[in-house]
Image (tube, rainbow, N blue to C red):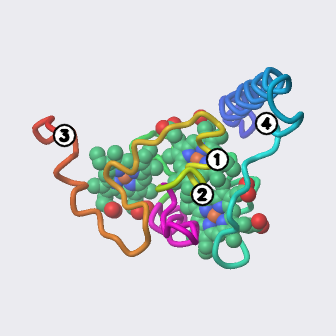
Amino acid sequence: MAIMANLPVLGKWFRIFACLGAMAFTAIASTQAVAGVDLPKLEHGKGDQCVDDVAFIRRHHPDLLKHHRDETVRLGIRTTKYSLKKCVECHAGSKTGSVASSEEDFCVACHRYAGAKLDCWDCHATKPGKQVPDAKPVLPQHGGSK
Ligand code: HEC
Ligand code: HEC
Ligand code: HEC
């Protein structure tokens, strides 16, 4: 059962890696050989370790974080362990103080590379210590204006 449950996730990652592989392959002609295969240089987070095993968090953070998805319920995320605020506290870049202000900032650097775009920052602060005062007004259910 556990393996079955993981299959869609694994499939996704295989597609991503296949895709990255293909991108790297086409990039070889124009740019330096393996540049496209390595992850972008990511700043080390604060402290010694992440909230979970790095391999686990790399693979599962999308599902762990998405509050509006069934996965959150299914995976039983009921604690603040995977709080987005906490990610921001530890992963804000030293230059910008943000996880997503510049292309080198932690979340963006990897997502740009992986081709993932987040709408989280429409509501959630990219910097530590900031509240999300406009989060509730922008919730689409309330009036639909943005
Ligand atoms: C339309 C506004 C909106 C968007 C877009 C949005 N959220 Fe939220 N989110 C909220 C609100 C409101 C809360 C509850 C208030 C709080 O806890 O900050 C919340 C709470 C959370 C929490 C629990 C509190 C915390 O800081 O851990 C997580 C995790 C979270 N959101 C993740 C995400 C992720 C990941 C995305 C992007 C995929 C996202 N949200 C997009 C409005 C939004
Ligand atoms: C207490 C500080 C802390 C918190 C909170 C934290 N991280 Fe981390 N994170 C780290 C550190 C330190 C590393 C580097 C660990 C290592 O290399 O062994 C890391 C590594 C990572 C990596 C792997 C980066 C790479 O080089 O491939 C990802 C992805 C990640 N974190 C995402 C998150 C997400 C998403 C959250 C919120 C759910 C989060 N982190 C919360 C400190 C933190
Ligand atoms: C080591 C690379 C890496 C880092 C660093 C990283 N992500 Fe991701 N993230 C990915 C990949 C790859 C995907 C696409 C995975 C998928 O589609 O299943 C993704 C997807 C997501 C998604 C789901 C997007 C969606 O709408 O489906 C969320 C939410 C997310 N990341 C949040 C974060 C946050 C917040 C941070 C910074 C704290 C972060 N990620 C840092 C690699 C990374």
What residue is rendered at 64% in x and 47% in y? 110
Q: Is residue 129 left or right of residue 33?
A: left
Which region of the structure is painted magenta? 80-100
Question: Which residue in the structure is indicated by mark 3?
Answer: 146
Q: Is mark 3 within 8 Å of ligand 1?
A: no
Residue type marked 1? Cys
Task: Please tell me the numbered disc located at residue 110.
Answer: 1
Alpha carbon distance from label 4 to label 3: 37 Å
Q: Which of pointers 4 and 1 indicates the residue nearer the eye?
A: 4
Farthest-out residue, left? 143
Q: Secondary structure at mark 2?
A: helix
Q: Earlier in the sequence, mark 4 or mark 3?
A: 4
Question: Which residue in the structure is indicated by mark 2?
Answer: 106
On the image, the x and y values in percent for residue 42 come to 69, 58
**How would you rate the neighbour count of disc 2 (Cα within 10 Å): few for under 14, some for 14-19, many for 20 or more?**
many
| As drawn, 25 above or below 123 | above
Does any portion of residue 142 appear in the rendered image?
yes
Alpha carbon distance from label 4 to label 1: 12 Å
Image quadrant containing the N terminus: top right
What residue is rendered at 25% in x and 55% in y? 135
On the image, the x and y values in percent for residue 58 come to 69, 50
Farthest-out residue, right? 33
Q: Earlier in the sequence, mark 1 or mark 3?
A: 1
Residue type marked 2? Phe
Question: Which residue in the structure is indicated by mark 4?
Answer: 36
**How would you rate the neighbour count of disc 4 (Cα within 10 Å): few for under 14, some for 14-19, many for 20 or more?**
some
